[in-house]
Amino acid sequence: MVEVKDLTKYYGEYAAIEGVSFKVEKGEILGFLGPNAAGKTTTMRIIAGFMPPTSGTATVAGTDVVRDSVEARRKLGYLPEQVPLYDDMSVREYLGFCAKVRGVARDKQAERVDTVMEATRVTEYADSLILKLSKGFRQRVGIAQALVHDPPLLILDEPTVGLDPRQIVEVRELIRGLRGEHTVILSTHILPEVQVVCDRVVIINEGKIAAIDTPEALTARLRRSQQVRLDVRGPRKDVAEALRTLPGARGVTDEDAGDGVFRFTLEADPDKDLREIAASTGVKHGWGLREMSSVAMSLEDVYIHLTTTDSGAAPANAKAPTDGAAREVTE
Amino acid sequence: MRPVLAIAQRELRAYFGAPMGWVVMAAFMAFAGYFFWAAIALAGIGEMRMWFSNTTIILIILLPALTMRLIAEERQRGTIEVLMTSPVTDTQAILGKFLGAFAFYAVMLLLTIQFPVTLARLGTPDRGPFYSGYLGMLLFGGTFLAVGIFISTTTKSQVVAYVGTMFVLLFLWLLSWAGMGDAWWQKLLQYVSIPTHLDEFAKGLIDTRDVFYYVSFIGGMLFLSVRALAAWKWR
Ligand SMILES: Nc1ncnc2c1ncn2[C@@H]1O[C@H](COP(=O)(O)OP(=O)(O)O)[C@@H](O)[C@H]1O
Ligand SMILES: [Mg+2]
């Protein structure tokens, strides 16, 4: 449905995105995930035909968004980040205007407006001025606007930003309800959003693609192994050897935690939980098990990992980020 | 054409829905009424010629207030992103906006028809200059609106758009004063300045050269606006 090839956009000297390529299949919800200033909005504006890239191409259902811009725009609906709508119009008037401008047949316009108002549940505010709507309803009108000409592709730029938790849940539900009938690209800098809503994730950082995969596979990719951390009082070598020979274990590292206690980090196959067997092994040998925890890698770890250390686009002066700094980026 | 009409219609309604449209219209009617009354009651002139040329001067102040928001507001509020990701060409967007403002201006002019009608009741003046004068006023205002939409395209500040347009219009007006005389450069200035072309209309003569001048001036300005809009997106 969408094919993006080698997109690069310079604002003056500054490259907002560089060599961005990905595909979106028909009917899927693609999450475009990245910290602020990663280049999400820039990429979406280009796909939506708002501005041309410096180089590279993007096609929507086979139509080039630069060469055949108007034709490509017929096939998409776009919701910009700040939800800019004509505040001086009522919801019905505004959607009617959008339907007209997008080329909905005259005798279908009123019907389409009613349909999308139902779908986004704004019918009760049909005759209110957009100016008077709450942020949550405004967002829904924004989505209704993108849907009014029934385009195969929807591009939603941070559709839940600035909403309260209940509104966020509602808007996510609304978007999930579009799956199948519409192809959706949505951007977000909030991780749980892609886990909840998206079929696939493109992680973008500093203008470059860091990873493309399903949320599950992405998690698994960095969780090629899972880790168990144990603090044990006992003979360092023997304990390490005993852990290493557990079924499913891949490797063990150890460090001195002081007081005769050693900290072991046991790596194991992702589908095995070695905690119980590790514990009973320790008991069998009479070693003192002080503490044990499973260090699972969440998608959040993957995200932080990819958007900090692994980016490859990190500026020369950036030192290896601490955990705290990495988390800051995601907020 | 459909998107053009949809945009024009929206703009026209926006003028009636916001204070600015009413303020401009009320101010226009106040000045226009005063000039009419002054001509009839004070000077005893039973024709519209003076009225046309007086009224054009207040358009320098009023018409930029109509055009300032056309593109600048869309840029400032971001609504231009929704508009320009709709299947609408830059030309259609500019044309729609221009027609919306033009239609509002036409309504303003229409409300002044009462003045020549009054004159017709009072005496039996020649009707030709009314028709040609109004056609001239329409075209004349069109050039101002076209300048205004161009300047509105180059900024996202409505204030800058207003002040900028007013100064450009004032400058173009002054050209016609500097052009009073018979030297070749003065004739040239006369030709390029906007108000000179209105004189013949007001006298009752529709000269195709004047019509051509106004229409091509409007066309040129709209073309520049389209280019400015595209350049802004491509930057
Ligand atoms: N119109 C613009 N002019 C100059 N720089 C811009 C412009 N728009 C975005 N940028 C810069 O490009 C980078 C990417 O921005 P953006 O695409 O908005 O990122 P995101 O949506 O992921 O937050 C940022 O560093 C931003 O400052
Ligand atoms: Mg953004």
Image (cartoon, grey):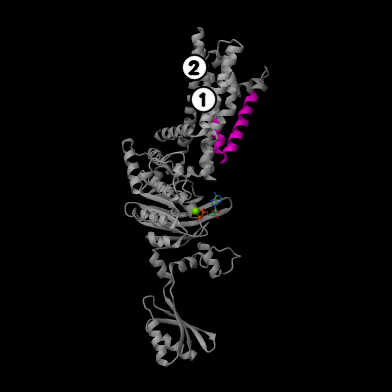
Question: Foreground: A330 or A267?
Answer: A330
Which labelled disc corresponds to residue B215? 1
Q: For the magenta stretch, what is the residue range?
A: B146-175
* Residue B64 visible in the displayed image: yes
Up-down relation of residue B227 to residue A174 (above or below) = above
Measure the C-alpha gap from mark 1 to mark 2: 27 Å
Q: Nearer the viewer, mark 1 or mark 2?
A: 2
Total number of numbered labels?
2
Question: Mark 1: which amino acid?
Answer: Val
Q: Residue at x 33, y 54 (%)?
A: A177
| Mark 1 Cα-neighbour bin, 10 Å: few <14, some 14–19, many ≥20 | some
Q: Earlier in the sequence, mark 1 or mark 2?
A: 2
Q: Residue at x 54, y 29 (%)?
A: B24
Label 1 secondary element: helix
Question: Foreground: A51 or B101?
Answer: B101
Q: Position of residue A208 (x, y in %)?
A: 50, 59
Q: Residue at x 51, y 25 (%)?
A: B215
Q: Position of residue A125 (x, y in %)?
A: 38, 44
- Residue B168 painted magenta: yes
For label 2, the residue is B114
Up-down relation of residue A216 to residue B58 (above or below) = below
Question: Foreground: A216 or A91?
Answer: A91
Up-down relation of residue B143 to residue A60 (above or below) = above
| Mark 2 Cα-neighbour bin, 10 Å: few <14, some 14–19, many ≥20 | few
Label 2 secondary element: helix
Question: Foreground: B15 or A45?
Answer: B15
Q: Position of residue B40 (x, y in %)?
A: 57, 12
Question: Mark 2: which amino acid?
Answer: Gln
